[in-house]
Image: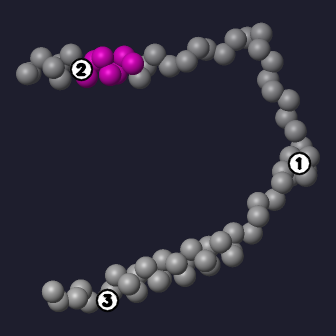
Amino acid sequence: MRRLPVLLIPMLLMSCASGGTPPDAQTPYPVLLPIDQILVDATPAPDPTADLASRASALRARAAVLRQPLPEG
């Protein structure tokens, strides 16, 4: 059993150190876009207020049911 950690730890370290391929000198850098252009193209997320309010009220109702005492039987 003592051999397992001795063999496992170096194997794990070697797998972490393998890394990816080094960048090629011939690969060009990606084109940078102005932030204004990126923000214009993005679609705004819908307002989650109504959905969150309904979920909160449903959770409050479930919590109220769970707080009720158990019937004696």
Residue ID at (81%, 59%): 44
Could you tell me if the residues under marks 1 and 3 are in contact, i.e. CB atoms within 8 Å?
no
Q: Amino acid at mark 3?
A: Gln
Select label 3 or label 2 by which is in front: 3
Q: Is residue 49 left or right of residue 1?
A: right
Mark 1 is on which residue type?
Asp
Magenta extent: 9-15
Question: Does residue 35 appear in the picture of this structure?
Answer: no
Residue at 61% over, 14% down: 22
Q: Is residue 9 visible?
A: yes
Q: Position of residue 52 (x, y in %)?
A: 62, 73
| Relative vertical location of residue 66 with respect to residue 42 in this rendering, above or below | below
Q: Which residue is mark 3?
A: 68
Tell me the kind of residue under disc 2.
Leu
Q: Position of residue 48 (x, y in %)?
A: 69, 69
Element type where label 2 sits in the image: helix
Dividing the picture into quadrants, the one containing residue 72 is: bottom left
